[in-house]
Image (cartoon, rainbow, N blue to C red):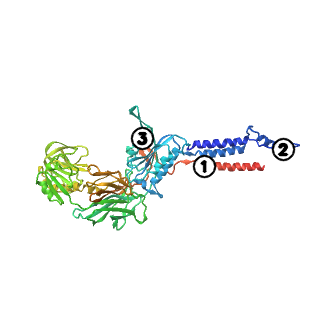
């Protein structure tokens, strides 16, 4: 048992009980009268003796009942509770705000129920103000796949509750370890006299979540820490949604768009969904019949395996850029608790033809090949002129044909032969005669490309470092490498095609065409793929862009500043939906839309976990509705019953 306001109850008891006892000591003051006999006045004499001040109190049922009534009321004012209560030390409330916490059950979202539980715990731990007991401090952390401090350690109940109310939902995933690391960082203190000496105070941690945490295997408690898991959510909450969405322009029909979606069902019963396709806000297609998705099943490892289905919309003509939205809804009035995975947005750019700059000697094999591709513009210039450049605009792709520039301005490059001058590509010699041992056949660059017959007579030895990705290699080293540095991207082929049999193979033409398309349509590909909550939004804007703003799906606007290379970044994005970049440029107003989607079946699983397994420790969850047991209403009831008994005893004595 714990007392929320023990000092208040003690003050109340000391104010009302001593005066009651004192009243029983007081003597009634009566006027003296002479009478002939006192035989008939025995009771008056007894009454006179009872009212003599400071005499020894005799046992009296009325006095006992009155003391019990006042004591019950005083104890009720002290607010005793069972389970929890005003604590001592530091407590951290870790509140899950991830996508699954937006599931609606019994008319309220899980996050709303979590906030109610967190407010109640703050009141328990911090009591009712300066009259409350304990010296507790409470910290509030909201987390999804990242953690954010809503309130540092504080003993002010009002400020802590206000911080809890400020927690807003997120469409991100859910991970516990970042929240634990953040809490421990605030509990770590440094000795001013010895900065190298630090100490971490053991914490009392309370996780308020549905338990759908992705990183429990990496999350362990430290010595002295305690963790309480407050489970929010039901065990069998149905949910179905979109797991994957894609749109593409067929190579033979660049003016049309084909749209595909994969659906999932994480519920225990089969469901039927209807899918709707909208283009720029106008409905373009509706699935002709409900899409049946089987129920989720439990695999051999005990994990829930969602049921899945697919839907493909017929291709439609769309020669300009467009915003495509796919929405699903239960057919025939079915139930679905989570709405953020019922929609997906895809920003499809207009079909474009690329401008390519080739750097190297005039003519040659690559020049002939590039001229045969459907490009809007192709130019060539010598290495000396390229070294004078500070920008590669207006070209989309630069092909380095056997040359190595002094430096690379921001841009997208396809380099053949010498290693491009970028960190991570360390050239240390040459080697002869090689066959391709392995390649990333699933990569977009190798669409309709096989390297099984490729023989390289001479190639550059390159040691990849850092974030360099090897796409194809021989037994002697990498042959094709990929570097993505945001504004600068490089596809490095470590040999001259003329030093191999590649020009004789069809794969050479297909690879070069794929490379130009992949590099040139890089921003388009990013738009088509979209982002997921938790990722940053980055974009390279036109030169001279100013007044840059980002409008989030909920209408909130953020002012941005461009970087030195013309790129701008914002994030991480917390909400699913369409984010819009707006800016001013010399020619007028510009805008770019970026889709952020909450896709995937893992966060769509809404069955609340029974417990959390942290390392070798299992922490059983307690229901948020189970909470504390307040005893003060019962004490008030006891006080009323005792008051009624006291009244009956008094009436009987008065009638005797």
Farthest residue toward the top?
193
Q: Indicate which disc residue 634 carries.
A: 1
The residue located at (67%, 41%) in the rendering is 18
Residue 382 point in image, percent of width and height: 13, 51
Query: Would residue 602 be found to the left or right of residue 115 on screen?
Result: left
**Camera-nearest label, 3 or 1:** 3
Residue 461 in picture, x, y percent from top left: 17, 43
The answer for how far apart the CA atoms under marks 3 and 1 are is 40 Å
The residue identified by callout 3 is 186
Of callouts 1 and 2, which one flags the residue occurring earlier in the amino acid sequence? 2
Most extreme residue toward the bottom is 288
Q: Sequence-wise, which precedes: disc 2 or disc 3?
A: 2
**Mark 3 residue element:** helix
| Spatial CA span between label 2 and label 3 | 79 Å
Disc 1 to disc 2, how far (Cα)? 46 Å
State the image quarter where residue 16 is shown. top right
Tell me if 637 is positioned left or right of 581 in this view.
right
Identify the residue position indicated by label 2 in the image: 41
> Where on the picture, by quarter, is residue 179?
top left
């Amino acid at each position: 048992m714990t007392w929320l306001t023990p000092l208040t109850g003690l003050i109340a008891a000391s104010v009302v009980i001593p005066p009651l006892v004192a009243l029983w000591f007081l003597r009634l003051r009566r006027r003296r009268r002479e009478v002939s006999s006192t035989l008939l006045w025995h009771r008056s004499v007894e009454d006179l003796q009872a009212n003599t001040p400071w005499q020894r109190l005799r046992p009296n049922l009325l006095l006992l009942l009155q003391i019990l009534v006042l004591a019950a009321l005083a104890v009720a004012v002290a607010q005793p509770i069972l389970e929890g209560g005003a604590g001592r030390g530091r407590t951290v409330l870790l509140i899950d705000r991830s996508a699954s916490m937006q599931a609606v059950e019994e008319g309220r979202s899980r996050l709303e129920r979590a906030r109610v539980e967190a407010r109640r715990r703050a009141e328990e731990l911090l009591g009712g103000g300066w009259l409350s007991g304990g010296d507790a401090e409470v910290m509030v952390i909201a987390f999804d796949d990242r953690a954010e401090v809503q309130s540092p350690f504080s003993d002010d109940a009002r400020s802590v509750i206000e911080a809890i109310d400020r927690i807003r939902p997120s469409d991100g995933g859910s991970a516990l370890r970042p929240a634990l690391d953040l809490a421990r960082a605030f509990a770590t203190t440094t000795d001013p006299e010895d900065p190298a000496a630090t100490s971490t105070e053991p914490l009392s941690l309370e996780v308020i979540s549905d338990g759908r945490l992705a990183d429990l295997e990496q999350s362990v408690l430290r010595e002295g820490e305690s963790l309480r898991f407050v489970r929010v959510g039901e065990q069998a909450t149905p949910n179905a949604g979109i797991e994957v969405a894609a749109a593409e322009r067929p190579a033979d029909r660049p003016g049309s768009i084909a749209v595909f979606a994969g659906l999932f069902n994480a519920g225990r019963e089969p469901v039927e969904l209807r899918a709707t396709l909208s283009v720029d806000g106008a409905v373009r297609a509706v699935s002709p019949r409900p899409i049946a998705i089987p129920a989720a099943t439990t695999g051999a490892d005990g994990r829930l395996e969602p049921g899945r289905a697919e839907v493909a919309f017929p291709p439609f003509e769309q020669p300009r850029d467009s915003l495509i939205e796919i929405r699903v809804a239960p057919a025939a009035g079915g139930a679905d608790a989570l709405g953020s995975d019922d929609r997906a947005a895809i920003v499809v750019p207009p079909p474009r033809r690329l401008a390519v700059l080739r750097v190297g000697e005039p003519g040659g094999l690559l020049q002939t090949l590039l001229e045969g591709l459907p490009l809007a513009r192709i130019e060539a210039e010598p290495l000396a002129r390229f070294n004078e450049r500070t920008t590669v605009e207006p070209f989309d792709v630069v092909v380095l044909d056997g040359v190595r520039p002094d430096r690379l301005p921001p841009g997208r490059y396809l380099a053949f032969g010498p290693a491009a001058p970028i960190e991570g590509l360390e050239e240390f010699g040459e080697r002869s005669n090689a066959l391709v041992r392995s390649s990333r056949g699933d990569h977009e660059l190798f669409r309709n490309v096989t390297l099984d017959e490729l023989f390289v007579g001479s190639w550059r030895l390159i040691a990849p470092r850092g974030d360099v990705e090897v796409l194809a290699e021989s037994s002697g080293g990498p042959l094709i490498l990929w570097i993505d540095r945001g504004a600068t991207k490089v596809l490095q082929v470590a040999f001259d095609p003329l030093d191999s049999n590649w020009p004789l193979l069809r794969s050479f033409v297909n690879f070069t065409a794929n490379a130009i398309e992949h590099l040139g349509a890089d921003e388009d590909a990013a738009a088509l793929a979209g982002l997921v909550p938790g990722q940053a939004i980055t974009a390279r804007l036109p030169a001279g862009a100013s007044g840059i703003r980002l409008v989030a799906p909920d209408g909130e606007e953020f002012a941005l500043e461009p970087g030195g290379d013309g790129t701008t970044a914002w994030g991480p994005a917390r909400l699913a939906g369409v984010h819009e970049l707006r800016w001013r440029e010399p020619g007028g107003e510009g805008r770019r839309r970026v889709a952020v989607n909450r896709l995937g079946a893992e966060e769509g699983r809404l069955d609340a976990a029974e417990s959390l397994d942290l390392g070798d420790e299992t922490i059983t969850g307690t229901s948020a509705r189970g909470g504390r047991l307040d005893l003060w209403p019962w004490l008030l009831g006891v006080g009323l019953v005792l008051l009624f008994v006291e009244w009956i005893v008094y009436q009987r004595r008065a009638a005797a």
